[in-house]
């Protein structure tokens, strides 16, 4: 079942001679429960593409559909609610609120929704992330790996339709990277979580069901990983 | 938004002041200086205006009655003058007093008084001061219409000069206040922009995790408002201390300064409520709006 559909997407900066096409006519779709890696050199448009899927940046033209809904048909307020409920964003540099504890950072999107976090769900999440002992710590009192786990917890806690991770292991050593990837795999297998990961690291990409390669804003390759038999390659491009 | 949400965001705003104390202090100082500049100029203008009006009130109408007017009628006219619209004070000058004044004024040919044995030929008179110097001419004419009034005269040139002076002072003061307000707005805008810029990452993160614009802005609104309120309070106490000191010094200068209208300076007690309200309202409003406007460029998708 198709969860995400990106249709002829463009993001253009500048005008005339200074025009730069960061994303240049990209189309693909992702079925529910797939774990996709997007790889490419610096400046290939990976992060811009991810930001547009996460509705934190608007495309110049083209459409993005999530669960059949045209994302950018929504007004600013609806887009904020969309980001809060439908997507979970994870960044290389964690992007945690420095003055909030691990637990507060994780429950922030729920609090913004005016809801009280479910205690059982919170305990389970903290347990899965190995953060029970660190729940009252501020980001500055945690290691990089722990901070990234908090940021994954924040993304997972609202049970979003799709997790979007921009170089989630880019700032971590190999041990912590492996732990983070293990978390992604577990949430993908156990919760059927759809995940899109941007990475430079081919080892990370190999662990995904499908690898999309971007160059100069265009998709130059889109293949299923042979080690992940359940993946469907996308032939729409 | 629910009440609990508003309370949470308001608390966030107040906590933010402490967490970002250096930037909050910078905003406080800029707001304080701006309020003092504009508020000080406004108070200076109001006092100049009051002083000029005070000088005008020293402009008098000299009224002389027919010397044959009966004592009872003189008293009636005094009451009639006192009841006129624009009249402030009416001072009676008796025939005897007028005679003595004339004796004092005429030094050469003083011998002429040896041949005068009575002051009965002198007219009774009044020294009339007005409430509004701008209408002294109309008041003079009205007084002149009383049957027993032989002459009523004032100096319209003085009134005209003071009117012009007030116009010039008003134009200059309003121009200075507008210029200072503009400079203040630029200073405040730059400071709040810097304050928000220092926290742009926090704003971005809030946006990424799905905060609505109002959710991001409200704590900045509260923070700006509280900072502005305290800047307003600070400006009020500084103004009060400085104003009272200047007032005391000028009042101690005695009659010479009063001749220049210093006696018309507004005592702080009479205006302190309005000064406090103006400082607190303007400070809070400018602080809140400045902060919220500065967040705009960081939160738009």
Image (tube, coloured by chain):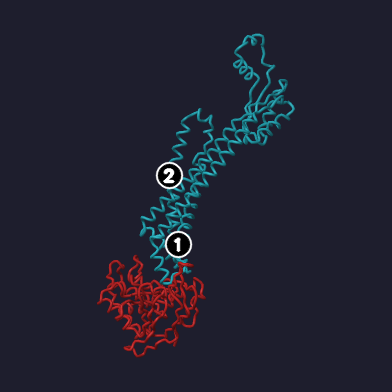
CA gap between label 1 and label 2 equals 31 Å
Residue picked out by circle 2? B238
* Tint of chain A: red
Which corner quadrant holds the N terminus of chain A? Answer: bottom left
Q: Nearer the viewer, mark 1 or mark 2?
A: 1
Which residue is disc 1 drawn over?
Answer: B295
What chain letter is assigned to the residue under label 2? Answer: B
Name the element at disc 1.
Answer: helix
The C terminus of chain A appears in which quarter of the rendering?
bottom left
The residue at 68%/18% (across/down) is B122
Which quadrant of the view contains residue A47? bottom left
Does any portion of residue A83 appear in the rendered image? no
Q: Count how many numbered circles sit on residues in the image.
A: 2
Residue A4 sits in quarter:
bottom left
Question: In the displayed structure, does residue B152 sit left or right of residue A159?
Answer: right
Residue lying farthest to the left in this orientation: A175
Query: What residue is drawn where x is 39% and y is 85%?
Result: A33
Of residues B47 and B289, the one drawn nearer to the viewer in this rendering: B289
């Amino acid at each position: 079942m198709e969860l995400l559909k990106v249709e002829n997407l463009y993001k253009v900066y500048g005008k005339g001679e200074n025009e730069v096409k960061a994303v240049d006519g990209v189309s693909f779709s992702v079925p529910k429960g797939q774990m996709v890696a997007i790889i490419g050199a610096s400046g290939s448009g990976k992060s811009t593409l991810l930001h547009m899927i996460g509705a934190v940046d608007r495309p110049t033209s083209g459409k993005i559909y999530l669960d059949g809904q045209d994302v950018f048909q929504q007004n600013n307020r609806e887009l904020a609610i969309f980001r809060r409920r439908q997507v979970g964003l994870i960044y290389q540099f964690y992007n945690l609120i420095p003055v909030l504890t691990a637990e507060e950072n994780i429950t922030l999107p729920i609090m913004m929704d005016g809801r009280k976090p479910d205690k059982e769900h919170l305990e389970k999440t903290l347990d899965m992330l190995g953060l029970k002992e660190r729940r009252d710590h501020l980001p500055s009192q945690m290691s990089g790996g722990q901070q990234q786990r908090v940021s994954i917890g924040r993304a997972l806690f609202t049970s979003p339709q799709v997790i979007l991770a921009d170089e989630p292991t880019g700032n971590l050593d190999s041990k912590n990277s492996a732990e983070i990837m293990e978390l992604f795999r577990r949430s993908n297998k156990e919760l059927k979580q759809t995940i899109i990961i941007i990475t430079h690291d081919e080892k990370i990409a190999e662990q995904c069901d499908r690898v999309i390669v971007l160059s100069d804003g265009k998709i130059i390759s889109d293949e299923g990983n042979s080690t992940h038999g359940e993946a469907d390659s996308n032939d729409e491009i | 938004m629910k009440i609990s949400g508003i309370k949470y965001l308001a608390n966030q705003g107040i906590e933010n002041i402490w967490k970002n104390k250096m930037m909050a202090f910078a905003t406080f100082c800029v707001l304080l200086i701006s309020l003092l500049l504009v508020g000080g100029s406004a108070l200076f203008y109001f006092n100049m205006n009051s002083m000029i009006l005070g000088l005008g009130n020293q402009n008098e109408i000299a009224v002389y009655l027919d010397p044959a007017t009966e004592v009872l009628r003189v008293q009636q006219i005094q009451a009639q003058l006192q009841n006129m619209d624009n009249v402030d004070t009416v001072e009676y000058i008796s025939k005897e007093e007028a005679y003595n004044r004339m004796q004092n004024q005429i030094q050469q040919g003083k011998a002429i008084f040896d041949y005068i044995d009575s002051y009965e030929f002198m007219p009774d008179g009044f020294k009339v001061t007005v409430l509004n110097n701008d209408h002294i001419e109309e008041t003079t004419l009205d007084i002149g219409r009383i049957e027993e009034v032989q002459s009523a005269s004032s100096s319209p040139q003085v009134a005209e000069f003071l009117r012009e002076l007030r116009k010039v002072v008003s134009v200059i003061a309003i121009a200075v206040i507008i210029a200072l307000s503009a400079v203040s707005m630029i200073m405040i805008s730059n400071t709040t922009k810097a304050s928000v810029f220092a926290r742009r990452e926090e704003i971005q993160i809030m946006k990424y995790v799905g905060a609505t614009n109002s959710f991001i802005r409200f704590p900045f609104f509260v923070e700006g408002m509280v900072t502005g309120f305290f800047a307003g309070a600070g400006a009020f106490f500084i103004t009060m201390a400085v104003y009272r000191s200047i007032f005391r010094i000028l009042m101690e200068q005695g009659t010479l300064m009063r001749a220049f209208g210093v006696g018309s300076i507004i005592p702080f007690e009479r205006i302190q409520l309005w000064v406090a309200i103006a400082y607190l309202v303007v400070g809070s409003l400018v602080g809140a709006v400045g902060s919220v406007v500065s967040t705009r460029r960081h939160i738009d998708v």
